[in-house]
Image (cartoon, grey):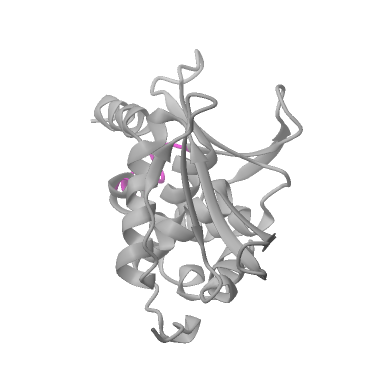
Amino acid sequence: MNTPQSQNIVIDEDIAYLIGVLQSDGCIYEFYDKKRNRKQIRLNLTICEKSLPMAEKFRNVLMNKLSIHTNIRKKTCDNAFMLQTSINRTAHILREWKKEELNNEINSKIELFGAYLAGLIDGDGHIQIKHNTDRRIPQMRIEIAEDRPMKVLQHLLYKFFNCKTHFTKCRTSNCIETCFYVSKKNIKLLELYVYPYIMILHKKERFQKFLEMNK
């Protein structure tokens, strides 16, 4: 089978979503396979049961767009699930997508950025509806926790959705949360370009609840 080249892969909404999940929850690592006497490069996605719809979407995109076939299996040691596969022939592509800098169409097309943002939210995002006493209409706060402030995401959130962001230290870990609000000025855009691609049920339901509150 020929090795796919990144320039030959069309960045559509499915790939954009996969990149968001890859950057948030995906892990790429190398190990030496003694049995085969060679270095192997693996992709790993370890998730809880609530995140299975995200993992299933991720698996399907790998298979349909990159011809990477893998399964999701339950781990025996804890209540978690894992997707794991060797990616020697596609590692150069996935490592490029793993970088925060988005040197592709996601930088310039709102529909692709929306799907990418949905992948980030499914992977490491938290959605909270804020009932502020000084506001007649509540706001929705979205936090995305990573090991660093996401400066590229900050720029693109303002570019596409007019969202101002701030960074806060997570109280329970060493992560930095990139936080932004959904309000009347951007709710229509996020409803159109982000909401349809969120796969994890409790996050989609909270988003839906906020949309209904604003109708």
Q: Is residue 108 above or below residue 167?
A: below
Q: Residue at x 62, y 53 (%)?
A: 154
Q: Nearer the viewer, residue 114 or 29?
A: 29
Looking at this rendering, what residue extends furthest in the front direction? Answer: 35
Residue 81 image offset from top left, x and y in percent: 45, 36
Relative to 126, 52 lies left or right: left
- Is 187 in the magenta? yes
Q: Residue at x 47, y 41 (%)?
A: 82
Identify the image quadrant of residue 1: bottom left
Residue 111 appears in the picture as rendered: no
Looking at this rendering, what residue extends furthest in the top direction? Answer: 133
Residue 7 image offset from top left, x and y in percent: 47, 85
Q: Nearer the viewer, residue 51 or 82?
A: 82
Q: Is residue 43 above or below residue 12?
A: above
Q: Nearer the viewer, residue 34 or 123?
A: 34
Relative to 25, 195 lies left or right: left
The residue segment tinted magenta is: 182-191
Q: Residue at x 54, y 26 (%)?
A: 77
Q: Residue at x 46, y 83 (%)?
A: 3
